[in-house]
Amino acid sequence: MTDISYWLMKSEPDAYSITDLRREQTTLWDGIRNYQARNFMRSMSIGDQAFFYHSNCKPPCIVGMMEVINISIIDPTQFDPKSKYYDPKSKQESPKWDCSELKYLSEFSSPITLEELKKTYTSEDLQVVRKGNRLSIMPIKKEIAEDLIRQSGLL
DNA sequence: GCCAACGTTGGC
DNA sequence: GCCAACGTTGGC
């Protein structure tokens, strides 16, 4: 039995929210155009869990949990000229961008706000509390993930 | 390879 | 609207 890893994945709720994911149940996490975030997705394993974080909204907060059900899927939006994520430099023979597929797991009855996270954790514990953090996908240490899940009232 | 200028994210 | 904290780009 192997341990799963935990991740935090940001999305602006205006663009895609936990409510959208609950309705669709699964989603491709496409449109990621940052190498570090892409590489984190590449290092995910099927069965890993991810915290769904609502960014650029009031209040920014963790709203639920997802499960990684697929990795290294070629991001179709890079080849779609109509997509805002279209990348003319990416070639069919050697796609630059890929993504994970996520499944809805749960929603927190009370979201954990960034304000709360800042009270409890330093930026070394949890990258998302770091001032000016722009990473949209980041790893979360297991102990902290378990803390957060406990705090969310899910378990 | 350096670095200035510019662009983006996202909290406040 | 401001700005911190990066990432990216392109000239040299």
Image (cartoon, coloured by chain):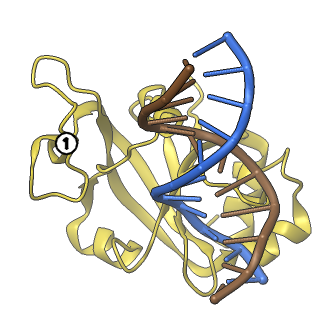
Chain colours: A yellow, B blue, C brown
Image vertical order of residue A47 relative to residue A110, above or below: above
Image vertical order of residue C6 relative to residue C4, above or below: above
Q: Residue at x 22, y 41 (%)?
A: A87
Q: In this view, does A34 lie to the left or right of A72?
A: right
The front one of A154 and A93 is A93
Q: Where is residue A1 in the image (x, y as percent from the top left)?
A: 54, 21
> In the rendered image, which residue does mark 1 sit on?
A78
User: What amino acid is labelled 1 in the image?
Assistant: Gln
Q: Is residue A117 left or right of residue A51?
A: right
The front one of A153 and A144 is A144
* Helix, strand or loop for disc 1: helix
Q: Residue at x 60, y 28 (%)?
A: A3
Residue A44 visible to an observer of this rendering: no
Where is residue B11, by image quadrant?
bottom right
Q: Position of residue A66 (x, y in %)?
A: 44, 55
Q: Which residue is drawn at 89% across and 65% down?
A: A120
Chain assignment, label 1: A
The front one of A132 and A140 is A132
